[in-house]
Image (cartoon, helix red, strand yellow):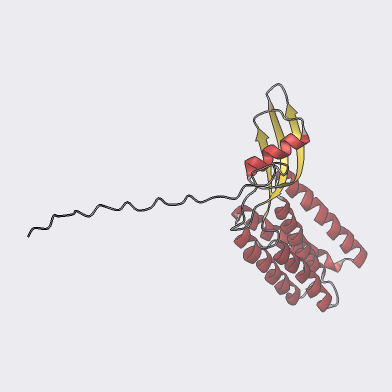
Amino acid sequence: MPSLLYIAADLVAIGVLVLGLYRSHHGRKDLVVSFLGANVGVLAVAAALAGVSTTASLGVGLGLFGVLSIIRLRSTELEQHDVAYFFSSLALGLIAGLGVQPAWLAAALMALPVLVLAVVDHPRFMGGARRQRIVVDRAITGEQELTDHLRDLLGAEPQRMTVVETDQIRDLTVVDVTYRVPRAGQRPTHRRPDAGPVAPAVRPVPAPAEISPVPVTAATR
């Protein structure tokens, strides 16, 4: 049976993970409730099984981990970052419920997923990377032609693309593309790389200001 210290450590870790990181970065209330419920549920079941032998409790805990993950993943479609938070929530509850010894090892294992997600899910970590599924309004079979079209459409250089479907009857192409958004102040790419150098922009010279004639008056004696 885990001590209250393990339970308190799990509540702190899941609070930082879900209420601190996930809510601020993604903010889906339904998944916040799901993560917290799954964590507390795994913690309670693992704590109840802690009185069994170590081998049996570990096997049951891992089996419960797998069953809960399969049920959760089959019930709705999750993004990849949601899957990472969900498995981390299960792992925290399982570590605390089994009462891993010594206590410092349990604390280190519980802190590890929290720290990793805090780094890799930060907005500045690969902040310019984007991924979209784009439906092009014509069937394009040439890879270079599709790359040029996506470059002009997105205003960025495609880094990786996967053609999902090319339908010549409906005249469309479905493609998954990964690209990087240009930084602030960086000029987006709209031209093909083999289009030659860009002519320097010439600013128009302003026309000279019109000089109004000065009236000349005849001098009188």
- Left or right, 199 with reference to 88: left
The image quadrant where one finds the N terminus is bottom right
- Residue 44: where, in percent of width, then height? 75, 64
Name which residue lies at 83% across and 67% down.
Answer: 50
The image quadrant where one finds the C terminus is bottom left
Outermost residue to the left? 221
Count of residue discs = 0
Q: Nearer the viewer, residue 206 or 93?
A: 206
- Left or right, 215 with reference to 10: left
Vertical order, 94 against 153 (above or below): below
Kindly indicate the quadrant of the structure image that contains residue 164: top right
Q: Nearer the viewer, residue 165 or 113?
A: 165
- Residue 93: where, in percent of width, then height? 76, 64
Q: Nearer the viewer, residue 69 or 148?
A: 148
Outermost residue to the top? 169
Outermost residue to the right? 55
- Residue 6: where, in percent of width, then height? 76, 73
Name which residue lies at 25% across and 52% down.
Answer: 213
Q: Nearer the viewer, residue 25 or 34?
A: 25
- Left or right, 214 with reference to 22: left
Vertical order, 40 against 215 (above or below): below
Kindly indicate the quadrant of the structure image that contains residue 99: bottom right
- Residue 122: where, in percent of width, then height? 67, 63
Name which residue lies at 85% across and 68% down.
Answer: 51
Outermost residue to the front? 221
Name which residue lies at 64% across and 30% down.
Answer: 137
